[in-house]
Amino acid sequence: MTARKSFNARLRTATPPIVGGLVASTLLITACRTQSEYASIGTLTPTVAVGSRGYELYQNNCAACHGPAGRGDGMFAFVLNTRPRDFWNEPFRYVSTLDGIATKEDVIQSIQHGRINGEMPGGQWLTGDDLSVLADFVIELNRLGWEERLREEFAAEGLSEEEIQEISLERVTTEQPAQTPVPSPSFAADLARGRDLYAQSCASCHGLSGRGDGLDVPRDEQGRAIAVRDLANEPIRGGDSPEELFNRIRSGIPGTPMPGQPLMAPDDVWQLVHYTRYIMGRPISSSPDALLTPSTDR
Ligand code: HEC
Ligand code: HEC
């Protein structure tokens, strides 16, 4: 095992040892904090206001992990292997657009299907309307996060309240339609081509074997070390259907060092999808139709 590899393994298995005591004490802290934390948010917009439908749904289904105010610090956050998203300060990662901004549909997908083998449970019990309200709720928290940062960072420049509102709204509104990934009719999967593209664009982080043992030691947007995914052995969090993989590879993963490939020809992205599935040990048949058949295992 290389040093890089064992570092990655440590990152992945870092779970606090005294889980029971931790849960009990965070329960207490969280309970005491809820009200004051909301008070500190300031004037809340109707979408996230205390007592709104989104607020109720969020507190009942999501706050235990994502925190009462959505800052990624719920009582269970500390016992999960993966940190729940801090909606204020982190971008959504599983996007289908090239500007890295999630569409509402992208966010609904995450809430409905859950992420990473159950660390975020899927909300299959939620109705379409609940999903829509919850998506608006977390997108609004994301926008409020931009407001907060803009106020802090540009206070001196005298940015007006109107400008702050306008810019923060732009930051959560995608300019781009979601991609409609379809391989061209002449597409034929070609492992050699996929391997070449992979060696050029992916191996520096994921390693030639795909086991996350490349030479780069990347950091996330907040400067924290981030484990590169072992594509051969670890779950694909944003979904492993060919279409989801296409979006992940083309759009990249915002907030992490994983770059997008906006300039790559879509058919080459499909070659990478094919090659990634090959690394995962689940090659797909090479016809364009088969590439678009949704996968059932998530
Ligand atoms: C058991 C803990 C848990 C619960 C409950 C939970 N989540 Fe999550 N959630 C997570 C974790 C962990 C992640 C990070 C997943 C990752 O990085 O792949 C996450 C990520 C997300 C994301 C980010 C998706 C993206 O594109 O980056 C959204 C949106 C989200 N959760 C919304 C919700 C909503 C809404 C609810 C309530 C219906 C909810 N979550 C309930 C643990 C949870
Ligand atoms: C600069 C380093 C870097 C490069 C280059 C890179 N990745 Fe990644 N990749 C990462 C990191 C870090 C993660 C884990 C992100 C996270 O934890 O959310 C990741 C995650 C992934 C995932 C899992 C996504 C999910 O939904 O969980 C896939 C698939 C992937 N990369 C494929 C690729 C492919 C294909 C390429 C080349 C086109 C590539 N990566 C290039 C760093 C990189």
Image (cartoon, rainbow, N blue to C red):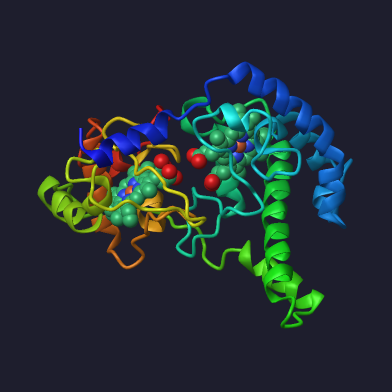
Q: Residue at x 63, y 16 (%)?
A: 20
Q: Residue at x 73, y 58 (%)?
A: 144
Q: Quadrant of residue 28?
A: top right
**273 versus 150 height, above or below:** above
For this rendering, which residue is in front, 23 or 109? 23
In the image: residue 199, left or right of residue 133: left
Tell which residue pokes out farthest to the top in this image. 20
Q: Residue at x 52, y 65 (%)?
A: 176
In the image: residue 157, left or right of residue 121: right
Which quarter shows the C terminus? top left
Q: Position of residue 94 (x, y in %)?
A: 49, 48
* Label tally: 0
Q: Position of residue 17 (x, y in %)?
A: 52, 21
For this rendering, which residue is in front, 270 or 166? 166
For this rendering, which residue is in front, 73 or 124? 73
In the image: residue 180, left or right of residue 266: right
Query: Is residue 184 at least partly visible in the picture?
Result: no
Q: Quadrant of residue 84?
A: top right
Tell which residue pokes out farthest to the left in this image. 192
Q: Position of residue 259 (x, y in %)?
A: 37, 59
Which quarter shows the N terminus? top left
**198 versus 160 height, above or below:** above
Tell which residue pokes out farthest to the bottom in this image. 157
Q: Position of residue 273 (x, y in %)?
A: 28, 46
Q: Residue at x 75, y 80 (%)?
A: 159
Query: Is residue 286 at least partly visible in the picture?
Result: yes
